[in-house]
Image (tube, rainbow, N blue to C red):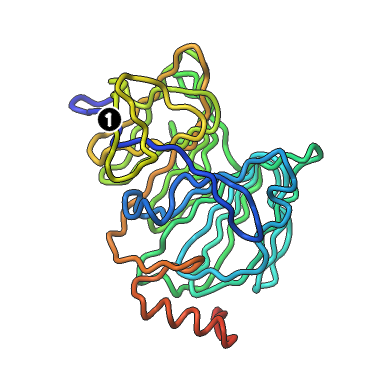
Amino acid sequence: MEPNTHERLIDRIWKSEPTIEGAGVHLKRAFGFHELPLLDPFLLLDDFRSENPAEYKAGFPWHPHRGIETITYVLDGDVEHGDSMGHKGDISSGDVQWMTAGSGIIHQEMPKGNSKGQMLGFQLWANLPANMKMMDPRYRGIKKNEIPLVTTADGASVRIICGEINGTKGPVQDIVIEPEYMDVELPANKSFTHIVKPNHNVFAYVIDGEAYFDQQRTPFSHDATGVNYFDMRSPCPCANGSLVLYKKNGTHITVTTDKHSVRFLLVSGKPLNEPIAWYGPIVMNTQEQLREAFKEYKDGSFVQHR
Protein backbone atom coordinates (compact mmCIF):
# COMPACT_ATOMS: atom_id res chain seq x y z
CA MET A 1 0.00 0.00 0.00
CA GLU A 2 1.22 3.50 -0.86
CA PRO A 3 2.63 5.81 1.85
CA ASN A 4 0.32 8.43 3.38
CA THR A 5 -2.76 6.29 2.97
CA HIS A 6 -5.22 6.01 5.81
CA GLU A 7 -8.00 3.66 6.71
CA ARG A 8 -11.66 4.59 6.49
CA LEU A 9 -13.27 4.26 9.89
CA ILE A 10 -16.85 3.27 10.59
CA ASP A 11 -19.40 6.07 10.59
CA ARG A 12 -22.28 4.04 12.04
CA ILE A 13 -23.69 0.53 12.33
CA TRP A 14 -27.26 -0.72 12.47
CA LYS A 15 -29.23 -3.95 12.17
CA SER A 16 -31.55 -4.91 9.34
CA GLU A 17 -35.22 -4.76 10.29
CA PRO A 18 -38.02 -7.26 9.46
CA THR A 19 -40.66 -6.04 7.02
CA ILE A 20 -43.16 -7.41 4.50
CA GLU A 21 -43.18 -6.40 0.83
CA GLY A 22 -44.76 -7.47 -2.44
CA ALA A 23 -47.70 -9.84 -2.02
CA GLY A 24 -46.53 -10.86 1.45
CA VAL A 25 -42.80 -11.58 1.27
CA HIS A 26 -41.13 -11.60 4.69
CA LEU A 27 -37.68 -10.07 4.44
CA LYS A 28 -35.18 -7.93 6.31
CA ARG A 29 -34.48 -4.38 5.17
CA ALA A 30 -30.89 -3.32 5.69
CA PHE A 31 -31.66 0.25 4.61
CA GLY A 32 -34.28 2.17 2.71
CA PHE A 33 -36.19 5.44 2.63
CA HIS A 34 -35.49 6.35 6.26
CA GLU A 35 -31.71 6.19 5.74
CA LEU A 36 -31.67 8.66 2.83
CA PRO A 37 -29.32 10.13 1.75
CA LEU A 38 -26.66 8.42 3.88
CA LEU A 39 -25.84 5.78 1.27
CA ASP A 40 -26.29 7.87 -1.91
CA PRO A 41 -26.38 6.66 -4.72
CA PHE A 42 -27.92 3.54 -3.16
CA LEU A 43 -31.54 3.60 -2.06
CA LEU A 44 -32.44 0.25 -0.58
CA LEU A 45 -31.03 -3.16 0.32
CA ASP A 46 -33.38 -6.06 1.05
CA ASP A 47 -32.27 -9.41 2.47
CA PHE A 48 -34.82 -12.02 1.39
CA ARG A 49 -33.27 -15.14 2.93
CA SER A 50 -35.79 -17.66 4.27
CA GLU A 51 -36.19 -21.39 4.86
CA ASN A 52 -40.00 -21.18 4.88
CA PRO A 53 -41.66 -21.06 1.44
CA ALA A 54 -44.79 -19.55 3.00
CA GLU A 55 -42.70 -16.43 3.72
CA TYR A 56 -41.74 -15.79 0.08
CA LYS A 57 -43.87 -17.81 -2.38
CA ALA A 58 -46.40 -14.97 -2.90
CA GLY A 59 -43.53 -13.03 -4.45
CA PHE A 60 -43.57 -9.64 -6.13
CA PRO A 61 -46.34 -9.70 -8.78
CA TRP A 62 -46.48 -7.24 -11.66
CA HIS A 63 -45.36 -3.76 -10.62
CA PRO A 64 -43.68 -0.75 -12.26
CA HIS A 65 -40.22 0.77 -11.84
CA ARG A 66 -38.84 4.04 -13.16
CA GLY A 67 -35.70 6.06 -12.46
CA ILE A 68 -33.60 3.36 -10.79
CA GLU A 69 -31.56 0.19 -11.22
CA THR A 70 -32.44 -2.99 -9.31
CA ILE A 71 -29.67 -5.50 -8.67
CA THR A 72 -30.79 -8.97 -7.63
CA TYR A 73 -28.13 -11.37 -6.32
CA VAL A 74 -29.26 -14.93 -5.59
CA LEU A 75 -27.14 -17.13 -3.34
CA ASP A 76 -29.44 -20.15 -3.40
CA GLY A 77 -32.81 -20.99 -4.93
CA ASP A 78 -34.41 -19.51 -8.04
CA VAL A 79 -36.28 -16.28 -8.78
CA GLU A 80 -38.60 -16.42 -11.79
CA HIS A 81 -38.95 -13.10 -13.60
CA GLY A 82 -40.84 -11.56 -16.50
CA ASP A 83 -41.36 -8.05 -17.82
CA SER A 84 -43.09 -5.71 -20.25
CA MET A 85 -40.19 -6.04 -22.70
CA GLY A 86 -40.92 -9.73 -23.17
CA HIS A 87 -38.05 -11.05 -21.09
CA LYS A 88 -38.63 -14.06 -18.86
CA GLY A 89 -36.52 -16.68 -17.15
CA ASP A 90 -34.92 -17.64 -13.84
CA ILE A 91 -32.25 -15.97 -11.74
CA SER A 92 -30.58 -19.06 -10.26
CA SER A 93 -28.08 -19.78 -7.49
CA GLY A 94 -25.04 -17.55 -7.84
CA ASP A 95 -26.57 -15.41 -10.61
CA VAL A 96 -27.07 -11.64 -10.74
CA GLN A 97 -29.67 -9.64 -12.63
CA TRP A 98 -28.77 -5.96 -13.09
CA MET A 99 -31.94 -4.27 -14.34
CA THR A 100 -31.95 -0.64 -15.40
CA ALA A 101 -35.58 0.47 -15.24
CA GLY A 102 -34.88 3.85 -16.83
CA SER A 103 -38.00 5.40 -18.39
CA GLY A 104 -40.19 2.61 -17.13
CA ILE A 105 -40.66 -1.12 -17.00
CA ILE A 106 -43.37 -3.35 -15.55
CA HIS A 107 -42.14 -6.67 -14.22
CA GLN A 108 -42.64 -9.41 -11.68
CA GLU A 109 -40.23 -11.42 -9.53
CA MET A 110 -41.41 -14.69 -8.01
CA PRO A 111 -39.01 -16.48 -5.62
CA LYS A 112 -39.22 -20.28 -5.93
CA GLY A 113 -36.53 -21.46 -3.51
CA ASN A 114 -34.42 -24.59 -3.84
CA SER A 115 -35.31 -28.26 -3.41
CA LYS A 116 -35.22 -27.84 0.38
CA GLY A 117 -37.50 -24.80 0.33
CA GLN A 118 -34.66 -22.37 1.03
CA MET A 119 -34.46 -18.96 -0.62
CA LEU A 120 -31.31 -16.90 -0.19
CA GLY A 121 -30.81 -13.60 -1.93
CA PHE A 122 -30.57 -9.83 -1.90
CA GLN A 123 -31.92 -6.91 -3.88
CA LEU A 124 -30.09 -3.60 -4.03
CA TRP A 125 -31.56 -0.43 -5.56
CA ALA A 126 -29.24 2.13 -7.13
CA ASN A 127 -30.40 5.57 -8.17
CA LEU A 128 -30.03 6.95 -11.69
CA PRO A 129 -28.90 10.55 -12.26
CA ALA A 130 -31.50 13.04 -13.49
CA ASN A 131 -30.18 13.02 -17.06
CA MET A 132 -30.51 9.22 -17.30
CA LYS A 133 -33.78 8.53 -15.50
CA MET A 134 -35.67 8.36 -18.81
CA MET A 135 -33.14 6.20 -20.66
CA ASP A 136 -34.35 3.01 -22.32
CA PRO A 137 -34.56 0.06 -19.92
CA ARG A 138 -31.97 -2.70 -20.19
CA TYR A 139 -31.00 -5.98 -18.56
CA ARG A 140 -27.68 -7.51 -17.71
CA GLY A 141 -28.12 -11.15 -16.75
CA ILE A 142 -24.89 -12.46 -15.23
CA LYS A 143 -24.51 -16.18 -14.65
CA LYS A 144 -22.55 -17.60 -11.73
CA ASN A 145 -19.73 -18.82 -13.97
CA GLU A 146 -19.25 -15.29 -15.34
CA ILE A 147 -18.50 -13.84 -11.90
CA PRO A 148 -14.78 -14.16 -11.16
CA LEU A 149 -13.70 -15.62 -7.83
CA VAL A 150 -10.31 -14.42 -6.60
CA THR A 151 -8.30 -15.32 -3.52
CA THR A 152 -6.32 -12.46 -2.02
CA ALA A 153 -2.98 -12.61 -0.27
CA ASP A 154 -4.92 -12.11 2.97
CA GLY A 155 -6.79 -15.38 2.36
CA ALA A 156 -10.13 -13.79 1.43
CA SER A 157 -12.29 -15.32 -1.29
CA VAL A 158 -14.00 -12.58 -3.28
CA ARG A 159 -16.71 -12.87 -5.93
CA ILE A 160 -16.47 -9.70 -8.03
CA ILE A 161 -19.79 -8.62 -9.56
CA CYS A 162 -18.40 -5.18 -10.34
CA GLY A 163 -15.18 -3.54 -9.31
CA GLU A 164 -11.62 -4.78 -9.39
CA ILE A 165 -9.16 -6.71 -7.20
CA ASN A 166 -5.56 -7.35 -8.21
CA GLY A 167 -6.31 -6.68 -11.87
CA THR A 168 -9.39 -8.91 -12.02
CA LYS A 169 -12.56 -7.03 -12.95
CA GLY A 170 -16.17 -8.01 -12.48
CA PRO A 171 -18.45 -8.47 -15.51
CA VAL A 172 -20.67 -5.43 -14.80
CA GLN A 173 -18.95 -2.31 -16.13
CA ASP A 174 -19.80 1.10 -17.61
CA ILE A 175 -22.28 2.03 -14.88
CA VAL A 176 -22.56 5.77 -14.26
CA ILE A 177 -22.20 5.55 -10.46
CA GLU A 178 -18.93 3.57 -10.85
CA PRO A 179 -20.07 0.92 -8.37
CA GLU A 180 -18.24 -1.90 -6.69
CA TYR A 181 -20.23 -4.93 -5.56
CA MET A 182 -18.36 -7.84 -4.03
CA ASP A 183 -19.19 -10.95 -2.01
CA VAL A 184 -16.33 -11.48 0.43
CA GLU A 185 -15.56 -14.53 2.59
CA LEU A 186 -12.76 -14.20 5.15
CA PRO A 187 -11.58 -17.11 7.32
CA ALA A 188 -10.98 -16.86 11.07
CA ASN A 189 -7.91 -14.97 12.29
CA LYS A 190 -7.41 -13.15 9.00
CA SER A 191 -7.44 -9.58 7.69
CA PHE A 192 -8.82 -8.19 4.42
CA THR A 193 -7.83 -4.77 3.08
CA HIS A 194 -9.40 -3.18 0.02
CA ILE A 195 -8.65 0.16 -1.61
CA VAL A 196 -11.79 2.25 -2.22
CA LYS A 197 -12.38 5.15 -4.58
CA PRO A 198 -12.09 8.70 -3.20
CA ASN A 199 -15.40 10.35 -2.24
CA HIS A 200 -17.44 7.19 -2.87
CA ASN A 201 -19.86 6.01 -0.24
CA VAL A 202 -18.91 2.56 1.04
CA PHE A 203 -20.88 0.04 3.09
CA ALA A 204 -20.70 -3.60 4.10
CA TYR A 205 -23.57 -5.95 4.97
CA VAL A 206 -22.79 -9.03 7.05
CA ILE A 207 -24.49 -12.21 5.82
CA ASP A 208 -22.69 -14.83 7.92
CA GLY A 209 -20.28 -15.01 10.82
CA GLU A 210 -18.76 -11.93 12.43
CA ALA A 211 -15.85 -9.52 12.10
CA TYR A 212 -14.45 -6.14 13.05
CA PHE A 213 -14.82 -3.64 10.22
CA ASP A 214 -12.04 -1.25 11.12
CA GLN A 215 -8.71 -1.93 12.78
CA GLN A 216 -9.44 0.43 15.67
CA ARG A 217 -12.45 -1.74 16.58
CA THR A 218 -14.27 1.49 17.28
CA PRO A 219 -16.98 1.32 19.96
CA PHE A 220 -20.21 3.20 19.26
CA SER A 221 -22.73 4.97 21.39
CA HIS A 222 -26.44 5.17 20.67
CA ASP A 223 -27.19 7.41 17.66
CA ALA A 224 -30.15 9.68 18.32
CA THR A 225 -31.09 9.71 14.63
CA GLY A 226 -32.39 6.14 14.74
CA VAL A 227 -33.50 3.81 17.51
CA ASN A 228 -32.12 0.75 15.75
CA TYR A 229 -28.47 1.80 15.89
CA PHE A 230 -26.25 -0.36 18.05
CA ASP A 231 -25.50 0.77 21.57
CA MET A 232 -21.86 -0.33 21.66
CA ARG A 233 -19.94 0.88 24.69
CA SER A 234 -17.08 -1.52 24.08
CA PRO A 235 -15.65 -3.03 20.90
CA CYS A 236 -17.61 -5.99 19.59
CA PRO A 237 -17.75 -7.69 16.20
CA CYS A 238 -20.49 -7.05 13.67
CA ALA A 239 -22.58 -10.16 13.02
CA ASN A 240 -25.20 -11.45 10.58
CA GLY A 241 -27.66 -8.73 9.55
CA SER A 242 -25.40 -5.79 10.45
CA LEU A 243 -25.03 -2.84 8.08
CA VAL A 244 -21.70 -1.06 8.37
CA LEU A 245 -21.48 2.43 6.85
CA TYR A 246 -18.01 3.90 6.46
CA LYS A 247 -16.92 7.51 6.81
CA LYS A 248 -16.27 9.37 3.56
CA ASN A 249 -12.58 10.05 4.09
CA GLY A 250 -9.93 7.36 3.71
CA THR A 251 -8.23 5.34 1.02
CA HIS A 252 -9.05 1.79 2.12
CA ILE A 253 -11.11 -0.37 4.44
CA THR A 254 -9.81 -3.19 6.61
CA VAL A 255 -11.83 -6.10 8.00
CA THR A 256 -10.40 -8.48 10.62
CA THR A 257 -11.65 -11.72 12.14
CA ASP A 258 -10.85 -13.50 15.38
CA LYS A 259 -12.08 -17.04 16.07
CA HIS A 260 -15.00 -16.83 13.62
CA SER A 261 -15.06 -16.43 9.84
CA VAL A 262 -17.23 -13.84 8.11
CA ARG A 263 -19.07 -13.37 4.84
CA PHE A 264 -20.26 -9.95 3.75
CA LEU A 265 -21.32 -7.87 0.80
CA LEU A 266 -19.03 -4.92 0.09
CA VAL A 267 -20.60 -2.13 -1.97
CA SER A 268 -19.51 1.36 -3.00
CA GLY A 269 -20.64 4.01 -5.46
CA LYS A 270 -20.27 7.64 -6.51
CA PRO A 271 -22.86 9.91 -4.82
CA LEU A 272 -25.24 11.75 -7.15
CA ASN A 273 -26.04 14.57 -4.71
CA GLU A 274 -29.39 15.19 -6.40
CA PRO A 275 -32.88 15.69 -4.94
CA ILE A 276 -34.90 12.50 -4.47
CA ALA A 277 -38.66 12.14 -4.89
CA TRP A 278 -39.57 8.56 -4.01
CA TYR A 279 -42.84 6.70 -3.72
CA GLY A 280 -43.02 2.91 -3.81
CA PRO A 281 -41.17 1.47 -6.84
CA ILE A 282 -40.56 4.82 -8.58
CA VAL A 283 -37.75 7.24 -7.76
CA MET A 284 -37.52 10.61 -9.52
CA ASN A 285 -36.17 14.08 -8.70
CA THR A 286 -39.40 16.04 -8.18
CA GLN A 287 -42.91 15.42 -6.88
CA GLU A 288 -44.30 16.55 -10.24
CA GLN A 289 -42.30 13.81 -11.99
CA LEU A 290 -43.67 11.28 -9.50
CA ARG A 291 -47.25 12.38 -10.12
CA GLU A 292 -46.73 12.15 -13.87
CA ALA A 293 -45.27 8.64 -13.57
CA PHE A 294 -48.23 7.31 -11.60
CA LYS A 295 -50.68 9.07 -13.93
CA GLU A 296 -49.04 7.34 -16.89
CA TYR A 297 -49.12 4.01 -15.08
CA LYS A 298 -52.83 4.44 -14.45
CA ASP A 299 -53.69 5.47 -18.03
CA GLY A 300 -51.50 2.83 -19.69
CA SER A 301 -48.79 5.09 -21.15
CA PHE A 302 -46.10 4.26 -18.57
CA VAL A 303 -43.96 2.02 -20.81
CA GLN A 304 -42.27 4.40 -23.25
CA HIS A 305 -39.09 2.67 -24.33
CA ARG A 306 -38.28 1.92 -27.95
Q: Can you name the residue that lies furthest to the left here?
A: 4
Amino acid residing under circle 1: Ser
Near-viewer residue (87 or 204)? 204
The residue drawn where x is 62% and y is 55% is: 141
Query: Which residue in the protein does label 1 denote?
Result: 221
Q: Viewed as shown, does residue 71 lie left or right of 196?
A: right
**Residue 290 x %, y %:** 42, 76
Near-viewer residue (5 or 274)? 274
**Residue 304 x %, y %:** 54, 81
Q: Which corner quadrant holds the C terminus?
A: bottom right
The residue drawn where x is 22% and y is 38% is: 249
Q: Viewed as shown, does residue 112 lie left or right of 226?
A: right
The quadrant in which residue 276 appears is: bottom left
With respect to residue 17, does 134 lie above or below? below
Name the secondary structure under disc 1. Answer: loop
With respect to residue 33, does 235 lie above or below? above
The quadrant in which residue 36 appears is: bottom left
Q: Viewed as shown, does residue 1 lie left or right of 51?
A: left
